[in-house]
Amino acid sequence: MSDSADRTELAQLEDEWMSAMQARDMDRLEELVAPGFRFTAIHLYPEPMSREQWMGAAREGYTITSFAYEHMDIDVFGDTGVVHARYSQVASWDQNNLSNVFRLTDVWSRRDGKWQVVARHSSILG
C-alpha cells in the first residue's frame, strides 16, 4: 500500500476510533486499540492510562456528545503511522466537563495487515 493510501486509511481510522468511543462500540474498540496501548494526558492523570483503563472509560464514564478533527498531519514510516491532530470535543467523564480543543499525537502500528493504535498523547490547547 502506498504512503498516500496509508495516510487516507489512518485518517479514516482516527474518525472510526472516536465514533466507536462515542457509540460505546466495544467490539470495534477491541479491534482498533492495541494490547499495550497507553494514553498520556497530564491534565487528567500524572501517569499514563493503560489500555484497560481506557477501555473501562469507554464502557462506563467517558461520554462524547460531539467531536471534530480540525486538522490532521499524518506521517507513515513503514508499518508505523504518526498522526498529529487538532481535535475538539464536547464531552464529559464522570460528570466532569472535558469539552475543549486538544493537540493529539497518536501512534499506529500495522500488525498482520491491520492498523491498531498503540499510544495517544493529549494536550489541552484551550
Image: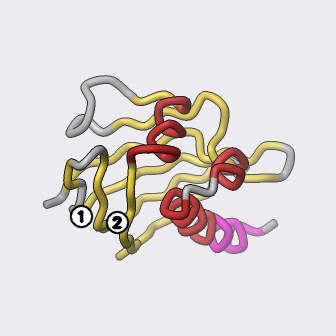
Residue 101 — which label?
A: 1
Question: What type is the residue that disc 1 sits on?
Answer: Val
Magenta stretch: dominant secondary structure: helix
The image shows residue 69, relative to residue 32, as above or below, that is below
Q: Which residue is at a point 29% across and 44% down the rendered structure image?
A: 94
Residue 87 — which label?
A: 2
Taking 27 as reference, is 48 left or right?
Answer: left
Q: Which residue is at a point 60% across and 53% down the rendered structure image?
A: 81
Q: Which residue is at a point 79% across and 52% down the rendered structure image?
A: 114
Residue 31 — which label?
A: none
Q: Which residue is at a point 54% across and 63% down the rendered structure image?
A: 23
Q: What span is colored magenta in the figure?
A: 2-10
The image shows residue 79, relative to residue 14, as above or below, that is above
Q: Is residue 92 magenta?
A: no
Instruction: Report x, y in % for residue 103.
Output: 30, 57
Instruction: Report x, y in % for residue 102.
Output: 27, 58
The image shows residue 48, relative to residue 120, as above or below, that is above
Circles 1 and 2 in contact, beta carbons < 8 Å: yes
Question: What type is the residue that disc 2 sits on?
Answer: Tyr
* Quadrant of the rendered image containing residue 126: bottom left
Which image quadrant: the N terminus?
A: bottom right
Label 1: which secondary element: strand
